[in-house]
C-alpha cells in the first residue's frame, strides 16, 4: 500500500484551512500596521504640541525677564535720583566728598539711561546664551 495518495489527499483538504489562516494573518498584520501608524501619528502630534507649548512658554519668559530687569533698573535709577536730590541739601564740601565716594566705588548718578543699561544687559546676556 502506497502512503503518498493519502498524504496528497490530506494536503488538498488542508489547503483551504491554510489559505484561511494566511488570510487571517494578513488581515491581522494589516490591522496591526494601521494601529502602529495611528500611534506613531499621535506621538508626532503630541511631540509637536509639546514643542509648541515649550516655545510659547519661552517666548513669554523672555519679555517677562526683560520687564523685570527694566523695572529693577528704573527703581535703582529712581533711588539714585533721590540720592542726588538729597545730596543737594548738604553743603558743597560734603556733596563733593559724598559724590567722590560714589565715583570711587563705580557708582555713577549720571550716565547711561535705564533703557540703555537694560538693553546692554540683554544684549550681553543673549550673546552668552547664543555662544553656549
Image (tube, rainbow, N blue to C red):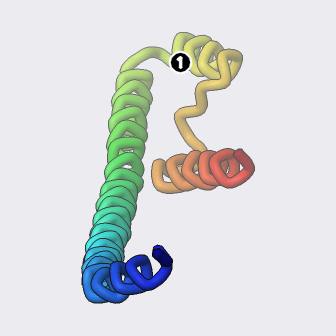
**Taking 12 as reference, is 31 left or right?**
left
**Taking 28 as reference, is 7 left or right?**
right
Q: Secondary structure at mark 1?
A: helix
What is the quadrant of residue 128 in the picture? top right
Location of residue 45 in the rendering, given as x and y in whole percent from the top left corner: 31, 71
Which residue is rendered at x = 32% and y = 51% of the image?
Answer: 64
Location of residue 2 in the rendering, given as x and y in whole percent from the top left corner: 49, 77
What is the quadrant of residue 86 in the picture? top left
Give neighbour class at mark 1: few <14, some 14-19, many 20+ (Cα, 10 Å). Answer: some
- Residue assigned mark 1: 95
- The image shows a total of numbered marks equal to 1
Outermost residue to the right? 131
Indicate the quadrant containing the C terminus: top left, top right, bottom left or bottom right.
Answer: top right
Q: Is residue 44 above or below residue 27?
A: above
Location of residue 123 in the rendering, given as x and y in whole percent from the top left corner: 62, 55
Residue 35 in sight here = yes
Which residue is rendered at x = 29% and y = 64% of the image?
Answer: 46
Q: Is residue 1 above or below residue 103?
A: below
Residue 52 in sight here = no
**Camera-side residue of 132 and 18:** 18
What is the quadrant of residue 63 in the picture? bottom left
**Camera-side residue of 85 and 53:** 53
**Camera-side residue of 91 and 123:** 123
**Camera-side residue of 1 and 5:** 1
Which residue is rendered at x = 69% and y = 52% of the image?
Answer: 127
**Taking 63 as reference, is 93 left or right?**
right
Which residue is rendered at x = 60% and y = 26% of the image?
Answer: 107
Amino acid at each position: 500500500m502506497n502512503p503518498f495518495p493519502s498524504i496528497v489527499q490530506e494536503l488538498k483538504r488542508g489547503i483551504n484551512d491554510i489559505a484561511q489562516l494566511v488570510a487571517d494573518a494578513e488581515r491581522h498584520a494589516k490591522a496591526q500596521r494601521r494601529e502602529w501608524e495611528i500611534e506613531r501619528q499621535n506621538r508626532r502630534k503630541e511631540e509637536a504640541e509639546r514643542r509648541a507649548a515649550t516655545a510659547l512658554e519661552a517666548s513669554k519668559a523672555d519679555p517677562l525677564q526683560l520687564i523685570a530687569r527694566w523695572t529693577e533698573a528704573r527703581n535703582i535709577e529712581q533711588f539714585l535720583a533721590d540720592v542726588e536730590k538729597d545730596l543737594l541739601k548738604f553743603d558743597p564740601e560734603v556733596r563733593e566728598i559724598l559724590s567722590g565716594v560714589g565715583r570711587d566705588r563705580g557708582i555713577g548718578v549720571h550716565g547711561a539711561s535705564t533703557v540703555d543699561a537694560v538693553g546692554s544687559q540683554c544684549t550681553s546676556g543673549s550673546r552668552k546664551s547664543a555662544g553656549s
